[in-house]
Image (cartoon, rainbow, N blue to C red):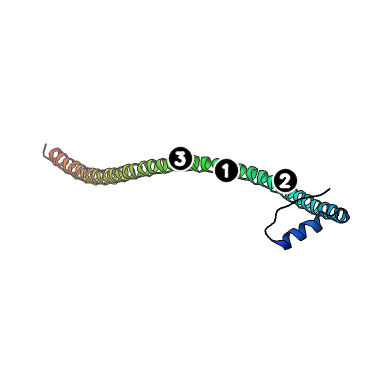
């Protein structure tokens, strides 16, 4: 089989004629085969790498989704805790206000009790004075009656 090529350079034409000679075709076939084997090996290597990368990408995607769900649940818990904390703070404020009221009422009751005790003490003292006065008047009455009996 005769190949005709039009070349500008004589060296290129010579190289092409050597390349297409029937005696060199088996070595060329072996070279092409080796080249194809190398290309197939590289293609196989890159396909395996691509499969591994896709698996790791899927795993990473699943982990990201899992972390996003966990993040959402933590946010919900945080919101719930914040609302619960706000409610507890309101309850604390109400209880503090109630405690102030009760303390004020207790102070009022103590003041009233001490006033009542002072009033009771004053009444007891007045009662003692009245009893003393009654005893004195009773003695005076007996003296006057005994004087009346002697005269009469």
Q: Residues within 10 Å of mark 1 (few under 14, many from 20)?
A: few
Point 48% across, 41% down: residue: 79
Circles 1 and 2: CB atoms closer than 8 Å: no
Residue for badge 1: 68
Alpha carbon separation for disc pair 1 and 3: 22 Å
Residue for badge 3: 83
Residue 48 horizontal/vertical position (percent): 75, 48
Circles 2 and 3: CB atoms closer than 8 Å: no
Q: Earlier in the sequence, mark 1 or mark 2?
A: 2
Horizontally, residue 62 falls left or right of residue 87, namely right
Q: Nearer the viewer, residue 57 or 126?
A: 57
In the rendered image, the residue lying farthest to the bottom is: 11
Residue 88 horizontal/vertical position (percent): 44, 42
Residue for badge 2: 51
Alpha carbon separation for disc pair 1 and 2: 25 Å
Query: Is 147 located above or below residue 46 in the figure?
Result: above
Horizontally, residue 109 falls left or right of residue 141, namely right
Circles 1 and 3: CB atoms closer than 8 Å: no
Q: Secondary structure at mark 2?
A: helix
In the rendered image, the residue lying farthest to the left is: 151
Residue 80 horizontal/vertical position (percent): 49, 39
Point 69% across, 48% down: residue: 53
């Amino acid at each position: 089989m005769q190949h005709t090529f039009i070349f500008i350079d004589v060296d290129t034409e010579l190289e092409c004629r050597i390349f297409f000679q029937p005696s060199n075709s088996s070595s060329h076939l072996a070279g092409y085969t080796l080249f194809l084997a190398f290309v197939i090996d590289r293609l196989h290597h890159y396909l395996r790498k691509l499969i591994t990368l896709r698996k790791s990408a899927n795993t990473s995607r699943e982990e990201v989704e899992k972390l996003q769900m966990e993040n959402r649940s933590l946010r919900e818990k945080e919101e719930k805790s914040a609302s619960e904390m706000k409610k507890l703070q309101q309850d604390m404020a109400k209880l503090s206000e109630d405690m102030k009221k009760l303390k004020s009422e207790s102070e009022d009751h103590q003041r009233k009790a001490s006033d009542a005790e002072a009033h009771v003490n004053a009444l007891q003292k007045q009662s003692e004075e009245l009893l003393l006065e009654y005893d004195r008047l009773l003695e005076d009455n007996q003296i006057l009656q005994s004087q009346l009996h002697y005269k009469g």
